[in-house]
Image (cartoon, helix red, strand yellow):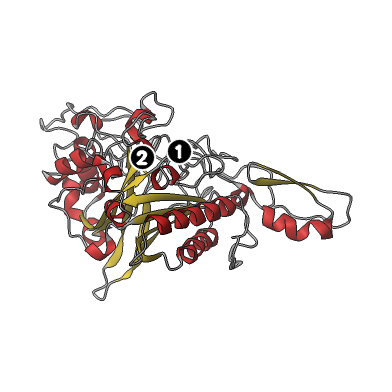
Protein backbone atom coordinates (compact mmCIF):
# COMPACT_ATOMS: atom_id res chain seq x y z
CA UNK A 1 0.00 0.00 0.00
CA UNK A 2 2.91 2.32 0.39
CA UNK A 3 4.48 2.98 -2.93
CA UNK A 4 2.43 5.18 -5.23
CA UNK A 5 2.33 8.95 -4.74
CA UNK A 6 -0.33 11.61 -5.18
CA UNK A 7 -1.22 12.09 -8.86
CA UNK A 8 -0.15 15.20 -10.70
CA UNK A 9 -2.88 17.79 -11.04
CA UNK A 10 -5.05 17.10 -14.05
CA UNK A 11 -5.47 19.54 -16.90
CA UNK A 12 -9.08 19.72 -15.74
CA UNK A 13 -7.98 21.89 -12.83
CA UNK A 14 -8.95 25.56 -13.14
CA UNK A 15 -6.67 26.62 -10.30
CA UNK A 16 -3.95 23.92 -10.18
CA UNK A 17 -1.76 23.56 -7.10
CA UNK A 18 0.86 22.58 -6.67
CA UNK A 19 -4.75 -2.51 -0.07
CA UNK A 20 -1.75 -2.21 -1.96
CA UNK A 21 0.78 0.28 -0.70
CA UNK A 22 3.66 -0.10 -3.09
CA UNK A 23 2.44 -0.75 -6.60
CA UNK A 24 -1.10 0.32 -6.58
CA UNK A 25 -0.42 3.65 -8.12
CA UNK A 26 -0.80 7.89 -7.32
CA UNK A 27 1.99 10.05 -9.63
CA UNK A 28 4.52 12.46 -8.31
CA UNK A 29 3.82 14.13 -5.01
CA UNK A 30 1.92 17.33 -5.69
CA UNK A 31 2.25 20.58 -3.81
CA UNK A 32 -0.70 21.20 -1.55
CA UNK A 33 0.49 24.58 -0.39
CA UNK A 34 -2.08 27.38 -0.79
CA UNK A 35 -1.40 29.79 -3.63
CA UNK A 36 -1.33 33.50 -3.11
CA UNK A 37 -4.43 35.51 -3.85
CA UNK A 38 -8.03 34.54 -3.23
CA UNK A 39 -11.23 34.34 -5.21
CA UNK A 40 -14.81 34.55 -4.02
CA UNK A 41 -17.12 31.68 -4.79
CA UNK A 42 -19.86 32.65 -7.22
CA UNK A 43 -22.41 32.10 -4.47
CA UNK A 44 -20.68 34.56 -2.15
CA UNK A 45 -20.21 37.10 -4.93
CA UNK A 46 -23.89 37.07 -5.78
CA UNK A 47 -24.68 37.64 -2.14
CA UNK A 48 -22.33 40.59 -1.69
CA UNK A 49 -22.06 42.29 -5.08
CA UNK A 50 -24.82 44.81 -4.34
CA UNK A 51 -23.40 45.83 -0.97
CA UNK A 52 -19.75 46.13 -1.94
CA UNK A 53 -19.90 47.19 -5.57
CA UNK A 54 -17.97 44.13 -6.78
CA UNK A 55 -17.79 43.51 -10.50
CA UNK A 56 -18.52 39.89 -11.31
CA UNK A 57 -16.57 37.97 -13.94
CA UNK A 58 -16.83 34.19 -14.29
CA UNK A 59 -14.73 31.91 -16.45
CA UNK A 60 -14.78 28.13 -16.52
CA UNK A 61 -16.99 27.93 -13.48
CA UNK A 62 -14.74 30.02 -11.21
CA UNK A 63 -15.67 33.59 -10.35
CA UNK A 64 -13.26 36.51 -10.16
CA UNK A 65 -13.75 39.82 -8.40
CA UNK A 66 -12.64 43.42 -8.77
CA UNK A 67 -13.17 45.92 -6.01
CA UNK A 68 -14.95 49.12 -6.94
CA UNK A 69 -14.16 52.27 -4.91
CA UNK A 70 -15.59 51.57 -1.49
CA UNK A 71 -14.78 52.29 2.10
CA UNK A 72 -15.56 48.69 2.94
CA UNK A 73 -12.98 46.15 1.80
CA UNK A 74 -14.17 42.60 1.33
CA UNK A 75 -11.85 39.80 2.41
CA UNK A 76 -11.47 37.17 -0.30
CA UNK A 77 -11.63 33.48 0.39
CA UNK A 78 -8.31 31.77 1.02
CA UNK A 79 -6.74 29.85 -1.83
CA UNK A 80 -7.93 26.57 -0.31
CA UNK A 81 -11.52 27.54 -1.07
CA UNK A 82 -10.93 29.02 -4.52
CA UNK A 83 -9.46 25.93 -6.14
CA UNK A 84 -11.91 24.58 -8.72
CA UNK A 85 -11.95 21.52 -10.96
CA UNK A 86 -13.84 21.44 -14.26
CA UNK A 87 -16.76 19.01 -14.47
CA UNK A 88 -16.68 18.61 -18.27
CA UNK A 89 -13.64 17.07 -19.92
CA UNK A 90 -12.14 14.04 -21.65
CA UNK A 91 -12.06 12.11 -18.38
CA UNK A 92 -14.24 12.44 -15.30
CA UNK A 93 -12.79 14.54 -12.47
CA UNK A 94 -11.50 12.85 -9.32
CA UNK A 95 -9.17 10.41 -11.09
CA UNK A 96 -6.00 12.41 -11.76
CA UNK A 97 -7.06 15.30 -9.50
CA UNK A 98 -4.66 15.81 -6.57
CA UNK A 99 -5.60 14.02 -3.35
CA UNK A 100 -8.23 15.92 -1.39
CA UNK A 101 -8.48 16.27 2.37
CA UNK A 102 -11.97 14.75 2.65
CA UNK A 103 -13.79 12.06 0.73
CA UNK A 104 -17.08 10.18 0.62
CA UNK A 105 -17.63 6.92 -1.24
CA UNK A 106 -21.27 5.94 -1.65
CA UNK A 107 -23.03 3.16 -3.59
CA UNK A 108 -26.68 3.14 -4.62
CA UNK A 109 -29.06 0.43 -5.77
CA UNK A 110 -31.84 1.31 -8.18
CA UNK A 111 -35.28 1.14 -6.57
CA UNK A 112 -37.65 -1.70 -7.37
CA UNK A 113 -39.24 -1.02 -10.74
CA UNK A 114 -36.65 1.58 -11.76
CA UNK A 115 -34.95 0.85 -15.07
CA UNK A 116 -33.05 2.49 -17.90
CA UNK A 117 -35.37 5.51 -18.17
CA UNK A 118 -35.16 6.29 -14.45
CA UNK A 119 -31.39 5.73 -14.44
CA UNK A 120 -30.94 8.18 -17.30
CA UNK A 121 -33.01 10.83 -15.52
CA UNK A 122 -30.99 10.27 -12.33
CA UNK A 123 -27.61 10.61 -14.06
CA UNK A 124 -28.88 13.75 -15.74
CA UNK A 125 -29.82 15.23 -12.34
CA UNK A 126 -26.58 14.11 -10.73
CA UNK A 127 -24.45 15.56 -13.52
CA UNK A 128 -26.22 18.93 -13.37
CA UNK A 129 -25.79 19.08 -9.59
CA UNK A 130 -22.13 18.05 -9.74
CA UNK A 131 -21.41 20.73 -12.34
CA UNK A 132 -23.00 23.44 -10.20
CA UNK A 133 -21.38 22.42 -6.92
CA UNK A 134 -17.93 22.00 -8.47
CA UNK A 135 -18.23 25.58 -9.74
CA UNK A 136 -19.02 26.83 -6.23
CA UNK A 137 -22.71 27.36 -6.94
CA UNK A 138 -25.69 26.29 -4.84
CA UNK A 139 -27.70 23.22 -5.77
CA UNK A 140 -30.59 24.04 -8.10
CA UNK A 141 -33.23 22.61 -5.76
CA UNK A 142 -33.51 22.87 -1.97
CA UNK A 143 -29.90 23.79 -1.27
CA UNK A 144 -29.07 23.19 2.39
CA UNK A 145 -26.69 26.20 2.70
CA UNK A 146 -24.10 23.98 4.37
CA UNK A 147 -21.42 25.28 1.99
CA UNK A 148 -22.82 28.82 1.63
CA UNK A 149 -19.64 30.57 2.80
CA UNK A 150 -17.16 28.33 1.00
CA UNK A 151 -15.69 28.21 -2.47
CA UNK A 152 -15.42 25.02 -4.56
CA UNK A 153 -12.48 23.75 -2.46
CA UNK A 154 -11.33 21.38 -5.24
CA UNK A 155 -14.65 19.51 -5.11
CA UNK A 156 -14.94 16.57 -7.50
CA UNK A 157 -17.85 14.19 -8.07
CA UNK A 158 -17.23 10.98 -10.04
CA UNK A 159 -19.84 8.44 -11.19
CA UNK A 160 -19.56 4.74 -12.01
CA UNK A 161 -21.68 1.65 -12.81
CA UNK A 162 -21.53 -1.71 -11.03
CA UNK A 163 -21.97 -5.16 -12.57
CA UNK A 164 -25.60 -5.39 -11.39
CA UNK A 165 -26.58 -2.08 -13.03
CA UNK A 166 -26.72 -3.59 -16.50
CA UNK A 167 -29.24 -6.32 -15.70
CA UNK A 168 -31.39 -3.80 -13.83
CA UNK A 169 -31.53 -1.53 -16.89
CA UNK A 170 -31.74 -4.15 -19.67
CA UNK A 171 -28.27 -3.23 -20.91
CA UNK A 172 -26.55 -6.60 -20.39
CA UNK A 173 -25.09 -6.56 -23.90
CA UNK A 174 -23.30 -3.31 -23.08
CA UNK A 175 -21.66 -4.64 -19.90
CA UNK A 176 -17.87 -4.67 -20.33
CA UNK A 177 -15.99 -7.95 -19.91
CA UNK A 178 -13.58 -6.06 -17.64
CA UNK A 179 -16.47 -5.60 -15.18
CA UNK A 180 -16.70 -9.33 -14.44
CA UNK A 181 -16.72 -9.88 -10.65
CA UNK A 182 -13.35 -9.89 -8.93
CA UNK A 183 -12.07 -13.34 -7.89
CA UNK A 184 -11.97 -14.39 -4.26
CA UNK A 185 -8.75 -13.61 -2.38
CA UNK A 186 -7.49 -15.37 0.75
CA UNK A 187 -7.29 -12.03 2.59
CA UNK A 188 -10.99 -11.30 2.00
CA UNK A 189 -13.39 -11.05 4.94
CA UNK A 190 -16.03 -9.22 2.93
CA UNK A 191 -19.27 -7.76 4.22
CA UNK A 192 -21.61 -8.13 1.24
CA UNK A 193 -23.88 -5.36 2.52
CA UNK A 194 -20.97 -2.92 2.18
CA UNK A 195 -19.76 -4.21 -1.20
CA UNK A 196 -20.64 -3.62 -4.86
CA UNK A 197 -23.83 -1.74 -5.88
CA UNK A 198 -25.65 -0.63 -9.03
CA UNK A 199 -24.18 2.88 -8.98
CA UNK A 200 -21.10 4.35 -7.32
CA UNK A 201 -20.26 7.97 -6.50
CA UNK A 202 -16.90 9.28 -5.31
CA UNK A 203 -16.86 12.74 -3.72
CA UNK A 204 -13.68 14.59 -2.76
CA UNK A 205 -12.99 18.13 -1.51
CA UNK A 206 -10.47 20.05 0.56
CA UNK A 207 -13.18 21.21 2.97
CA UNK A 208 -15.26 18.75 5.02
CA UNK A 209 -18.45 20.84 4.81
CA UNK A 210 -18.15 21.21 1.03
CA UNK A 211 -17.77 17.43 0.71
CA UNK A 212 -20.73 16.76 3.03
CA UNK A 213 -22.84 19.32 1.15
CA UNK A 214 -22.20 17.45 -2.10
CA UNK A 215 -23.01 14.11 -0.46
CA UNK A 216 -26.38 15.40 0.77
CA UNK A 217 -27.20 16.93 -2.61
CA UNK A 218 -26.40 13.67 -4.44
CA UNK A 219 -28.44 11.65 -1.94
CA UNK A 220 -31.43 14.00 -2.24
CA UNK A 221 -31.22 13.95 -6.04
CA UNK A 222 -31.57 10.16 -5.96
CA UNK A 223 -35.16 10.64 -4.81
CA UNK A 224 -37.28 7.56 -5.35
CA UNK A 225 -35.08 6.25 -8.17
CA UNK A 226 -32.30 4.79 -6.01
CA UNK A 227 -31.46 4.12 -2.38
CA UNK A 228 -28.12 4.16 -0.59
CA UNK A 229 -26.56 0.69 -0.33
CA UNK A 230 -23.46 1.76 1.65
CA UNK A 231 -21.47 4.90 2.39
CA UNK A 232 -17.92 5.41 3.68
CA UNK A 233 -16.08 8.56 4.73
CA UNK A 234 -12.34 9.13 4.55
CA UNK A 235 -9.66 11.78 4.88
CA UNK A 236 -6.14 12.74 3.89
CA UNK A 237 -3.69 15.32 5.14
CA UNK A 238 -4.93 18.86 4.46
CA UNK A 239 -3.16 20.92 1.79
CA UNK A 240 -0.50 23.12 3.35
CA UNK A 241 -0.13 20.97 6.47
CA UNK A 242 3.51 20.13 5.70
CA UNK A 243 6.41 22.52 5.28
CA UNK A 244 6.98 21.26 1.75
CA UNK A 245 5.11 19.06 -0.74
CA UNK A 246 5.52 15.37 0.03
CA UNK A 247 4.00 11.99 -0.60
CA UNK A 248 1.11 11.22 1.74
CA UNK A 249 1.37 8.99 4.81
CA UNK A 250 -1.17 6.36 5.80
CA UNK A 251 -2.39 5.43 9.29
CA UNK A 252 0.55 3.05 9.73
CA UNK A 253 2.81 6.07 9.47
CA UNK A 254 4.27 4.87 6.17
CA UNK A 255 4.85 7.11 3.16
CA UNK A 256 2.24 5.73 0.80
CA UNK A 257 2.39 6.17 -2.96
CA UNK A 258 5.98 6.63 -4.08
CA UNK A 259 5.77 4.55 -7.26
CA UNK A 260 2.35 5.63 -8.51
CA UNK A 261 2.18 6.10 -12.30
CA UNK A 262 2.54 9.74 -13.30
CA UNK A 263 0.27 11.49 -15.84
CA UNK A 264 3.46 12.84 -17.44
CA UNK A 265 4.59 9.31 -18.39
CA UNK A 266 4.13 8.40 -22.04
CA UNK A 267 2.16 5.22 -21.30
CA UNK A 268 0.03 6.66 -18.48
CA UNK A 269 -3.20 6.91 -20.48
CA UNK A 270 -2.68 3.43 -21.90
CA UNK A 271 -2.40 1.94 -18.42
CA UNK A 272 -5.15 3.94 -16.69
CA UNK A 273 -7.79 4.84 -19.28
CA UNK A 274 -9.81 2.88 -21.84
CA UNK A 275 -8.70 4.02 -25.31
CA UNK A 276 -11.05 6.10 -27.47
CA UNK A 277 -11.32 3.06 -29.76
CA UNK A 278 -12.04 0.74 -26.84
CA UNK A 279 -14.82 -1.77 -26.43
CA UNK A 280 -17.57 -1.10 -25.52
CA UNK A 281 -17.60 2.29 -27.23
CA UNK A 282 -19.43 4.02 -24.36
CA UNK A 283 -16.39 3.40 -22.10
CA UNK A 284 -14.05 5.42 -24.34
CA UNK A 285 -11.69 7.52 -22.15
CA UNK A 286 -13.16 5.91 -19.04
CA UNK A 287 -11.48 3.81 -16.36
CA UNK A 288 -12.24 1.01 -13.91
CA UNK A 289 -12.23 1.67 -10.17
CA UNK A 290 -11.53 -1.07 -7.63
CA UNK A 291 -12.76 -0.01 -4.19
CA UNK A 292 -11.68 -1.88 -1.04
CA UNK A 293 -12.22 -1.13 2.63
CA UNK A 294 -8.96 -2.35 4.15
CA UNK A 295 -8.86 -2.41 7.91
CA UNK A 296 -5.41 -1.94 9.44
CA UNK A 297 -4.73 -3.97 12.58
CA UNK A 298 -2.98 -1.02 14.16
CA UNK A 299 -2.55 -2.47 17.65
CA UNK A 300 -0.56 -5.39 16.21
CA UNK A 301 1.37 -3.15 13.81
CA UNK A 302 2.37 -0.67 16.47
CA UNK A 303 3.87 -3.45 18.62
CA UNK A 304 6.58 -3.91 15.99
CA UNK A 305 9.86 -2.02 16.24
CA UNK A 306 10.49 0.57 13.53
CA UNK A 307 13.11 -1.78 12.02
CA UNK A 308 10.57 -4.61 11.86
CA UNK A 309 8.01 -2.30 10.24
CA UNK A 310 10.58 -1.23 7.67
CA UNK A 311 11.37 -4.88 6.84
CA UNK A 312 7.66 -5.56 6.30
CA UNK A 313 7.37 -2.66 3.85
CA UNK A 314 10.87 -2.64 2.37
CA UNK A 315 11.36 1.10 2.87
CA UNK A 316 12.57 3.48 5.56
CA UNK A 317 9.65 4.75 7.62
CA UNK A 318 11.11 8.23 8.03
CA UNK A 319 11.88 9.04 4.39
CA UNK A 320 10.30 6.33 2.25
CA UNK A 321 13.73 5.48 0.81
CA UNK A 322 14.24 1.82 -0.19
CA UNK A 323 16.20 -0.28 2.31
CA UNK A 324 18.76 -0.80 -0.44
CA UNK A 325 19.74 2.87 -0.10
CA UNK A 326 19.18 6.31 -1.63
CA UNK A 327 16.19 8.63 -1.40
CA UNK A 328 12.46 8.00 -1.73
CA UNK A 329 12.61 8.02 -5.52
CA UNK A 330 15.80 5.94 -5.87
CA UNK A 331 15.25 2.70 -7.77
CA UNK A 332 15.09 -0.26 -5.41
CA UNK A 333 18.00 -2.72 -5.71
CA UNK A 334 16.32 -6.07 -5.19
CA UNK A 335 19.60 -8.01 -5.44
CA UNK A 336 21.53 -6.15 -2.75
CA UNK A 337 22.55 -8.28 0.23
CA UNK A 338 23.83 -7.39 3.69
CA UNK A 339 26.81 -8.71 5.66
CA UNK A 340 24.72 -11.72 6.69
CA UNK A 341 24.15 -12.65 3.05
CA UNK A 342 20.40 -11.96 3.22
CA UNK A 343 18.56 -9.58 0.91
CA UNK A 344 18.49 -6.03 2.30
CA UNK A 345 14.92 -5.78 1.01
CA UNK A 346 13.34 -8.97 2.43
CA UNK A 347 11.93 -11.47 -0.03
CA UNK A 348 8.40 -11.00 1.34
CA UNK A 349 8.57 -7.19 1.70
CA UNK A 350 5.48 -5.42 0.40
CA UNK A 351 7.50 -3.06 -1.79
CA UNK A 352 9.29 -5.96 -3.48
CA UNK A 353 6.16 -8.01 -4.18
CA UNK A 354 4.08 -5.17 -5.61
CA UNK A 355 6.64 -3.69 -8.03
CA UNK A 356 5.27 -3.55 -11.59
CA UNK A 357 8.42 -5.25 -12.92
CA UNK A 358 7.67 -8.16 -10.57
CA UNK A 359 4.08 -8.42 -11.88
CA UNK A 360 4.37 -8.36 -15.64
CA UNK A 361 4.10 -4.56 -15.70
CA UNK A 362 0.73 -4.54 -13.89
CA UNK A 363 0.01 -1.01 -12.70
CA UNK A 364 -2.83 1.03 -11.30
CA UNK A 365 -3.34 4.57 -10.10
CA UNK A 366 -3.96 4.51 -6.36
CA UNK A 367 -6.07 7.34 -4.98
CA UNK A 368 -7.09 6.30 -1.45
CA UNK A 369 -8.53 7.92 1.65
CA UNK A 370 -7.76 6.90 5.23
CA UNK A 371 -10.70 6.15 7.52
CA UNK A 372 -11.37 5.96 11.25
CA UNK A 373 -14.86 4.85 12.27
CA UNK A 374 -14.45 4.79 16.03
CA UNK A 375 -13.24 2.33 18.65
CA UNK A 376 -14.64 -1.19 19.05
CA UNK A 377 -16.00 -2.40 22.38
CA UNK A 378 -12.67 -4.13 23.02
CA UNK A 379 -10.76 -0.87 22.47
CA UNK A 380 -9.51 -1.68 18.97
CA UNK A 381 -9.63 1.18 16.42
CA UNK A 382 -11.81 0.58 13.36
CA UNK A 383 -9.38 2.33 11.04
CA UNK A 384 -7.51 1.79 7.82
CA UNK A 385 -7.60 2.61 4.13
CA UNK A 386 -10.46 3.25 1.71
CA UNK A 387 -8.44 1.88 -1.17
CA UNK A 388 -9.43 3.22 -4.60
CA UNK A 389 -7.35 2.32 -7.64
CA UNK A 390 -7.83 3.12 -11.29
CA UNK A 391 -6.82 1.11 -14.35
CA UNK A 392 -7.73 0.47 -17.99
CA UNK A 393 -8.45 -3.18 -17.16
CA UNK A 394 -8.61 -4.61 -13.62
CA UNK A 395 -7.70 -8.08 -14.91
CA UNK A 396 -4.33 -6.63 -15.94
CA UNK A 397 -4.04 -4.14 -13.06
CA UNK A 398 -5.43 -4.93 -9.62
CA UNK A 399 -6.09 -8.69 -9.91
CA UNK A 400 -2.57 -10.03 -10.67
CA UNK A 401 -0.99 -7.87 -7.96
CA UNK A 402 -3.54 -8.85 -5.31
CA UNK A 403 -3.14 -12.54 -6.21
CA UNK A 404 0.61 -12.23 -5.67
CA UNK A 405 0.08 -10.45 -2.34
CA UNK A 406 -2.12 -13.37 -1.28
CA UNK A 407 0.81 -15.73 -1.76
CA UNK A 408 3.18 -14.23 0.79
CA UNK A 409 3.11 -10.48 1.45
CA UNK A 410 4.51 -9.67 4.90
CA UNK A 411 2.04 -6.80 5.24
CA UNK A 412 -1.03 -9.02 4.83
CA UNK A 413 -0.76 -10.14 8.46
CA UNK A 414 -1.66 -6.60 9.52
CA UNK A 415 -4.55 -6.01 7.07
CA UNK A 416 -8.13 -7.24 6.67
CA UNK A 417 -10.11 -6.62 3.47
CA UNK A 418 -13.67 -6.00 4.69
CA UNK A 419 -15.55 -4.64 1.65
CA UNK A 420 -15.03 -4.60 -2.10
CA UNK A 421 -16.46 -3.20 -5.30
CA UNK A 422 -15.62 -2.87 -8.98
CA UNK A 423 -17.13 -0.09 -11.08
CA UNK A 424 -17.00 1.00 -14.72
CA UNK A 425 -16.43 4.76 -14.78
CA UNK A 426 -17.22 6.19 -18.23
CA UNK A 427 -15.29 9.03 -19.81
CA UNK A 428 -16.06 12.64 -19.00
CA UNK A 429 -19.21 14.34 -20.19
CA UNK A 430 -18.89 16.90 -22.97
CA UNK A 431 -20.65 20.25 -22.72
CA UNK A 432 -24.40 19.63 -22.88
CA UNK A 433 -24.03 15.94 -21.95
CA UNK A 434 -24.50 14.04 -18.70
CA UNK A 435 -22.24 11.26 -17.46
CA UNK A 436 -23.23 7.91 -18.95
CA UNK A 437 -25.38 9.40 -21.69
CA UNK A 438 -23.67 7.39 -24.43
CA UNK A 439 -24.56 4.18 -22.57
CA UNK A 440 -28.08 5.09 -21.50
CA UNK A 441 -29.18 6.73 -24.76
CA UNK A 442 -26.92 4.89 -27.21
Residue 92: x %, y % from top left: 46, 42
In this view, the residue in front, 258 or 390, is 390
Most distant residue in the top direction: 266
Identity of the residue drawn at 15% across and 40% down: 404
Q: Is residue 86 above or below residue 104?
A: above
In the rendered structure, the answer to whether residue 235 lies left or right of residue 395 reads: right
Crowdedness near tag 1: few (<14), some (14–19) or many (≥20) residues, C-alpha within 10 Å: many
In this view, the residue in front, 47 or 405, is 47
Which mark is on residue 322? none
Instruction: State which tag comes first along the sequence, 2 or 1.
Output: 1
Q: Is residue 127 above or below residue 358?
A: below
Which residue in the structure is indicated by mark 1? 91
Residue 297 falls in which quadrant of the image? bottom left
Q: Is residue 7 above or below residue 204?
A: above
Residue 122: x %, y % from top left: 46, 57
Which residue in the structure is indicated by mark 2? 287
Residue 237: x %, y % from top left: 45, 52
Amino acid sequence: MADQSTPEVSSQEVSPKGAIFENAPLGEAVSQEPSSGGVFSRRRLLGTAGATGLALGAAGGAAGYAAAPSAQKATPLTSLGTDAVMFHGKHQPGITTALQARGHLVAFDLAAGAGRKEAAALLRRWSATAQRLMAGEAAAQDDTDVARDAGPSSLTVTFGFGHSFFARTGLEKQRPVALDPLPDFSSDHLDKTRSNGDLWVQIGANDALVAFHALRAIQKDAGSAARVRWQMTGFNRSPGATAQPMTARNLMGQIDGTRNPKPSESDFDQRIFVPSSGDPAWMANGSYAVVRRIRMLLDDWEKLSVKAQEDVIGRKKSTGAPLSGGTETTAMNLDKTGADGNYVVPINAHARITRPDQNGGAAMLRRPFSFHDGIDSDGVPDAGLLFVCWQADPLRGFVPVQRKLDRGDALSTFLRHEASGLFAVPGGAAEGEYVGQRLLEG
